[in-house]
């Protein structure tokens, strides 16, 4: 009986499966989590390189960025907040599957052509940190910095708790975050790190990273990039 069970289940135990399609992975598969077929679901699409939103063809700056440029220089992302990326973000944040940060970071790092010399993350308020047990952006920063072989540091602190940004309009998001962050590392020197990247799991209106960019610009940082897993079109309003 035991030998029959082993013959039936041993191949399944030693042969890794693709996390999406559940089929056995092949030796030629390039990612430890997904097979090459499912990996195509994460393939990049044309975007504005400045704001990261979808465009017909890849452009350095879309019309909106030309008229109202954001404070950052370049935005890198894996995709929009849709299947399958959205599911992994949701599981990572709300189902305690924090190990997905490593897999998503590997995808993100493969898109970044000119890495910053320093990578930092969007901070959580301490109350939310205690409730969740970890900061997903900080985890993404740690793994992405490792993939890119660059330094990772915590530069910001959240000074007050705010309501969730999800579902708010662009103007409401901006008002919600006003004065919510400060520069934590007072010894940070823009002379040593003139090119800094900020990472977050999802960027929608950009209100959060906008506030953090202003803090870096005030201390003399010359170039700021944004790294994120999902770049989602902003809601109307």
Image: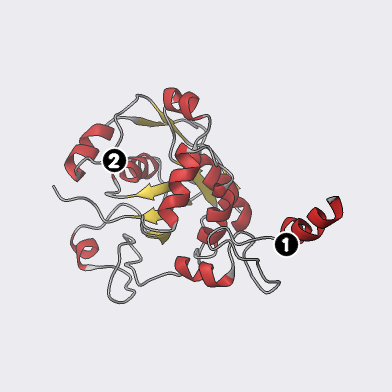
68 horizontally vs 15: left or right? left
Residue 69 point in image, percent of width and height = 25, 58
The answer to the question of whether label 1 and label 2 lie on touching residues, with beta carbons closer than 8 A, is no
Q: In whole angstroms, how far apart are the C-alphas of marks 1 and 2?
A: 39 Å
Query: Nearest the camera: 184 or 169?
Result: 169
The quadrant holding residue 8 is: bottom right
**Which of the two labelled residues, at mark 1 and mark 2, occupies the earlier sequence position?**
1
Question: Given this view, does label 1 or label 2 mark the residue nearer the observer?
Answer: 1
Label 2 neighbourhood size at 10 Å, few (<14), some (14-19), many (20+)? Answer: few
Mark 1 lies on residue:
15
Residue 149 appears in view: no
Q: Looking at the picture, does residue 3 appear above or below residue 95?
A: below
Circle 1 — which element? loop
Residue drawn 31% across the image and 77% down it:
57
Outermost residue on the bottom side: it is 57
Residue 29 point in image, percent of width and height = 64, 70
13 horizontally vs 105: left or right? right
Residue 131 appears in view: yes
Residue drawn 33% across the image and 70% down it:
60
Q: Looking at the picture, does residue 36 appear above or below residue 135?
A: below
How many numbered marks, from 0 up?
A: 2
Residue drawn 21% across the image and 34% down it:
175
Residue drawn 65% across the image and 67% down it:
25
Residue 11 point in image, percent of width and height = 76, 62
157 horizontally vs 119: left or right? left
Residue 217 point in image, percent of width and height = 36, 45
Mark 2 lies on residue:
166
Circle 2 — which element? loop
């Amino acid at each position: 009986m035991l030998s029959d069970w082993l013959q039936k289940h041993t191949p399944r135990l030693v042969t890794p499966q693709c996390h999406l399609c559940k089929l056995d992975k092949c030796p030629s598969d390039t990612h430890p989590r997904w097979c090459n077929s499912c990996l195509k679901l994460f393939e990049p699409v044309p975007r504005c390189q400045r704001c990261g939103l979808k465009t017909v063809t890849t452009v350095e700056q879309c019309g909106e960025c030309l008229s109202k440029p954001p404070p950052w220089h370049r935005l890198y992302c894996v995709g929009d907040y849709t299947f399958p990326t959205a599911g992994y973000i949701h599981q990572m944040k709300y189902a305690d599957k924090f190990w997905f940060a490593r897999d998503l970071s590997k995808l993100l790092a493969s898109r970044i052509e000119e890495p910053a010399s320093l990578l930092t993350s969007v901070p959580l308020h301490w109350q939310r940190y205690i409730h969740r047990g970890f900061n997903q952006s900080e985890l993404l920063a740690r793994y992405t910095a490792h993939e890119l072989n660059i330094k990772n540091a915590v530069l910001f602190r959240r000074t007050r708790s705010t309501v969730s940004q999800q579902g708010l309009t662009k103007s409401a998001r901006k008002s919600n975050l006003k004065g919510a962050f400060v520069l934590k590392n007072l010894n940070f020197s823009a002379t040593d790190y003139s090119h800094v990247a900020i990472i977050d799991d999802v960027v929608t209106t950009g209100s959060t990273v906008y506030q953090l960019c202003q803090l870096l610009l005030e201390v003399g940082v010359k170039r700021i990039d944004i790294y994120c897993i999902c770049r989602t079109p902003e809601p109307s309003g």
